Image (cartoon, grey):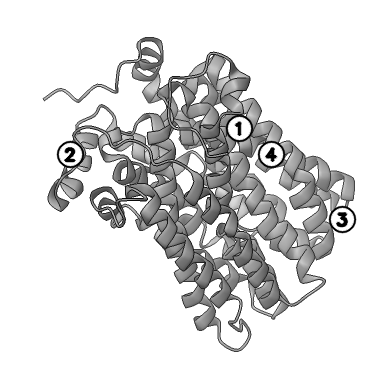
């Protein structure tokens, strides 16, 4: 059955959850999340097994630079349509996903021990196509959902995203005990067929009136419109800082768990698979709570839970190789991650003008990648300099500046949620 086209917000929450729009958000979230850890924790495990030092493994976070720069080429995806029959969003999505499948398969044929530079270049190519896919998927979700559905849509997208990450890292690690890493990457390339099929069956969202008709308009107008808003710069700084501690911690969890003596199968089965239930519950719970609490209060509550979940990694460092402790920490981390990311994505989507969806969302989500890519790059060296316990306590403290910035937005966010009015422009 084809996915349904955009409509008025559902009166019943379960009707909304099981609608075609939400199914598309979930499946596209899966397609978006699958490539991420193929250049992250799975690649880290492959490199550690090949004898690469922690410092170099940490620096490999820099291959994710395309995630922080995608706003540069996003205007092209807003302005041009590759195939009128498929539409602007789906035609770009289909091409990018085909290239992404080829890039993932190509990464599997590299050799970390003999040619780490070749691995870096192949991983960079995967990141580029993955970031490009994210641009179109984020724009599609914003344009196909009503404003009232953004929180729920974001929570389902987070669930699909995280399940794909669990498949790529947890499932990948389990498979790596049964077959070679190159074979694992071929399996993951085949799993991208979920995204390809969703693109073919999902309907094209309507093009908003006033969308750019020239490349100049596509490049200039989205930024001009955004920076005319109140607290425009502080919003971007908040996006960088809100999940910084969480990203710094997650960037080194795989080497951390291996150092504690957990096997790859234990990490795959407990850290990745066991956490799936908590993740799904966190994403759905976050979406439902946002309907009641609003985005502002949800960002506060979920942000605090994220910081506390990072501190439990320091407790695990004291426990050592403890399967029960690992399961508890993983469940809490996944629950808070699902809730926090749902609110985070809904916050950014709500700020996006539908006339310039791809470019404005890419600008904000590019900054979202800075903590994971640039600021987390020295994580390996910090982990070597500090104990694991001290490192994760530092990550907990790093989460506080983002929460402090959130206090600056209270006046206009609460007013906007109460009245539905847009973010006001700055006074001239």
Position in image of residue 188 (x %, y %): 64, 64
- Name the residue carrying label 3: 321
Q: Nearer the viewer, residue 70 or 141?
A: 141
Of badges 3 and 2, the one in the foreground is 2
Of badges 3 and 1, the one in the foreground is 1
Nearest to N terminus: mark 4 or mark 1: 4
Between the residue at mark 4 and the residue at mark 3, the CA separation in whole angstroms equals 23 Å
- The residue that appears at 46% across and 70% down in the rendered structure is 124
Q: Nearer the viewer, residue 281 or 251?
A: 281
Nearest to N terminus: mark 2 or mark 4: 2
Look at the image and tell me in which quarter the N terminus lies.
top right
- The residue that appears at 37% across and 50% down in the rendered structure is 86
Pointers 3 and 2 in contact (CB under 8 A)? no
- Name the residue carrying label 4: 279
In the displayed structure image, the side of residue 287 where residue 413 appears, left or right: left
- Name the residue carrying label 1: 339
- The residue that appears at 60% across and 81% down in the rendered structure is 109
Task: Label 4, secondary structure: give it.
Answer: helix
Between the residue at mark 2 and the residue at mark 1, the CA separation in whole angstroms equals 32 Å
Position in image of residue 11 (x %, y %): 53, 13
- Indicate which disc residue 224 carries: 2
Nearest to N terminus: mark 3 or mark 2: 2
Pointers 2 and 4 in contact (CB under 8 A)? no
Nearest to N terminus: mark 4 or mark 3: 4
**Residue 329 lies in what quarter of the image?**
top right
Nearest to N terminus: mark 2 or mark 1: 2
Task: Label 2, secondary structure: give it.
Answer: helix
Task: Label 1, secondary structure: give it.
Answer: helix
Position in image of residue 30 (x %, y %): 59, 49
């Amino acid at each position: 059955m084809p996915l349904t086209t955009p409509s008025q917000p559902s009166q019943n929450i379960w009707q909304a959850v099981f609608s075609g729009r939400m199914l598309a958000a979930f499946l596209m979230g899966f397609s978006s999340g699958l490539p991420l850890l193929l250049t992250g924790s799975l690649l880290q495990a492959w490199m550690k097994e090949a004898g690469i030092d922690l410092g170099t493994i940490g620096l490999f976070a820099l291959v994710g630079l395309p995630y922080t720069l995608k706003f540069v080429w996003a205007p092209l995806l807003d302005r041009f349509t590759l195939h009128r029959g498929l539409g602007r969003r789906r035609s770009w999505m289909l091409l990018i996903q085909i290239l992404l499948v080829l890039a993932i398969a190509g990464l599997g044929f590299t050799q970390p021990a003999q040619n780490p530079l070749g691995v870096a270049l192949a991983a960079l190519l995967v990141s580029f196509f993955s970031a490009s896919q994210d641009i179109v998927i984020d724009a599609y979700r914003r344009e196909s959902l009503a404003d009232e559905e953004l929180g729920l849509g974001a929570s389902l997208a987070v669930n699909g995203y995280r399940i794909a990450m669990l498949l790529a890292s947890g499932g990948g690690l389990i498979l790596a005990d049964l077959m070679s890493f190159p074979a694992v990457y071929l399996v993951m390339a085949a799993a991208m067929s979920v995204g390809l099929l969703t693109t073919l069956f999902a309907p094209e969202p309507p093009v908003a009136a006033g969308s750019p008709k020239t490349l100049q308009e596509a490049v200039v107008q989205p930024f001009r419109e955004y920076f005319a808003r109140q607290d425009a710069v502080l919003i971007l700084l908040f996006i960088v800082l809100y999940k910084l501690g969480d990203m710094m911690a997650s960037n080194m969890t795989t080497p951390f768990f291996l150092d504690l003596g957990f096997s790859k199968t234990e990490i795959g089965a407990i850290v990745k698979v066991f956490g799936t239930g908590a993740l799904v519950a966190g994403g759905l719970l976050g979406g439902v709570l946002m309907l009641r609490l609003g985005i502002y209060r949800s960002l506060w509550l979920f942000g605090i839970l994220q910081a506390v979940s990072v501190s439990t990694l320091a407790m695990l460092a004291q426990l050592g190789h403890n399967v029960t402790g690992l399961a508890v920490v993983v469940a809490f981390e996944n629950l808070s991650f699902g809730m926090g990311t749902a609110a985070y994505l809904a916050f950014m989507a709500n700020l996006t003008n539908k006339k310039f969806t791809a470019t404005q969302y890419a600008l904000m989500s590019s900054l979202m990648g800075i903590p994971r890519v640039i600021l987390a790059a020295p994580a390996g060296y910090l982990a070597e300099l500090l104990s694991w316990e001290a490192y994760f306590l530092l990550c907990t403290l790093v989460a506080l500046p983002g929460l402090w910035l959130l206090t600056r937005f209270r006046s206009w966010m609460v007013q906007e949620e109460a009245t539905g009015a847009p973010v006001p422009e700055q006074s001239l």
